[in-house]
Image (spheres, rainbow, N blue to C red):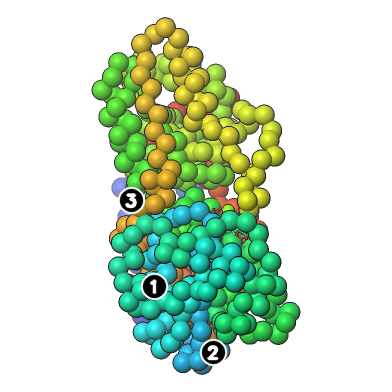
Amino acid sequence: MNTADLLTITSDDLAITRLGERTVDTPLSDLLGERQETWHYVTETDRVMLDVVQGIANKRDVDVAGLPAFNPGGPRRKLFFEPSEVTAAIVTCGGLCPGLNNVIRGLVLHLGRAYGVKRVLGFRNGFKGLTDGSEPMELTEQSVADIQNRGGTILGTSRGNQDPVVAVDSMVRLGVNILFVIGGDGTLRGASKLADEARARGERIAVVGIPKTIDNDIPWIDRSFGFHTAFAQAAQSIRAAHIEASSTENGVGLVKLMGRHSGFIACYSTLASHDVDFTLIPEVPFDVDVLMSRLKKKVEAQGHAVVVVAEGAGQEHFPASDQTDASGNAKLNDIGALLKKRIIDAFGDEPLSVRYVDPGYEIRSVPANAFDAVYCTRLAQAATHAGMAGFTSMVVGQWSGRMVHLPIALATASRNVVDPHGQLWMNVLETTGQPKQML
Ligand code: ATP
Ligand code: MG
């Protein structure tokens, strides 16, 4: 649909014909429970807005000025920087995620081809490369050729806190005008401090983030890059575990997937494979004894069962610990190993084959699929436009299908989690047939 169509279409055009009155009670209420009733059932007055762009409403004389709206991504007629004089730099931090190289390549190509930027630097090994005095790489069309076909990041990555004062010193010394930061919540908080430090010194350096989280837990964006590739790969692991489990007597496939705080990969790969009997995510607590008794019943009835568990699920079953990684993130206890042991205990002398699959690194390190590759390219283009326009302390992302700018403060203030009363979790419950509560 083009903009002209959006301006002329009416509610009548979108009205749906129906066969007659609806009189039969749905059986779904049994599955959903009381709380979900409020959320899931569509009422007569519910609508999905046709378009989220304020411009359309303005042209139709609808007053939307008071409604919250994002600053849109995309090219500006007027730039802040003179492109031919710009030195841009790129840094990747945190854990690996499919698509990092696609974003790097997208930035280098778009800066050079669309804006004629002559100098693009790549800091090595995360923020460490801004403070350890190492020389950055010169990124050119040649040096980024074919990197989209490789997983990981050609720039390297790291954890551990770095001094923003030293980092800004490096950028000033190298004449960096725009820093593109590709990383997760920790990285973006770091990026925000770099932008603050530069501003405090009166240095005109734009800091633009491209949020990276394989868990899809950045708020206010439709999805993060690499997520699509990750759950597609996770679905392959589920497929393997299901084949193993269903080929053995009392086979139990147990698959541990990523998801420290948010179970999106577990949910989406469950929906993609339709072979999972129990999906366990951090957002929905469960009792291990209840799970075991349900699992035994399932194996009795079906001959096998598949359990998918997100790494952050069931952390309440471990003693509290204050262990952290170099960046200060809490270390997770191994819920997969605990469940494997409890399954073996639960079956006792009965026949049992547990197939435990932990594909974390295999998923993180694959190259982006075509769908994510497109998204990475679009994010890189939006980030380039934002940087050239002089926007800073912000990230790019897609919201309701549109590229938008999001302040880093907002992107790091909360986390995108699976709503236990929301539609996605309901879809999972409908797919696995697991009870809505295992407590
Ligand atoms: P992921 O969680 O996906 O691994 P991340 O970006 O959150 O990605 P971290 O290891 O937490 O990964 O952080 C990456 C870098 O960001 C670290 O090297 C650290 O220097 C910096 N960083 C993390 N948290 C902060 C913070 N609160 N303030 C400043 N810098 C931070
Ligand atoms: Mg993080």
Q: Which marked residue is nearer to the observer: mark 3 or mark 2?
A: 2
Residue 62 picture location, percent across and down:
54, 77
Q: Measure the C-alpha gap from mark 1 to mark 2.
A: 19 Å
Give amino acid for label 1.
Answer: Gly
Examine the rendering and report whether any part of residue 389 can be seen: yes
Q: Name the residue carrying label 3.
A: 18
| Residue indicated by mark 1 | 106
Tag 3: amino acid? Arg
Q: Is residue 134 above or below residue 351?
A: below
- The span from disc 3 to disc 1 (Cα, nearest Å) is 47 Å
Q: Nearer the viewer, residue 417 or 95?
A: 95
Q: Where is the N terminus found, in terms of image quarters?
A: bottom left
**Residue under the point 43% across and 61% down:** 153
Give amino acid for label 2: Phe
Residue 165 coordinates in the image, percent (x, y): 70, 72
Disc 1 secondary structure class: helix
Residue at x 50% of width, y 92% of height:
85
90 over 373 or under it: above or below: below
Instruction: Give the labeled residue for mark 2.
Output: 81
Disc nearer the start of the sequence (1/2):
2
Q: Is mark 3 within 8 Å of ligand 1?
A: no
Q: Within the image, what quadrant is residue 97 found in?
A: bottom left
* 305 over 62 or under it: above or below: above
- Circle 1 Cα neighbour tier, 10 Å, few/some/many (<14 / 14–19 / ≥20): many
Nearest to N terminus: mark 3 or mark 2 = 3
Between residue 153 and residue 107, name the one nearer to us: 153
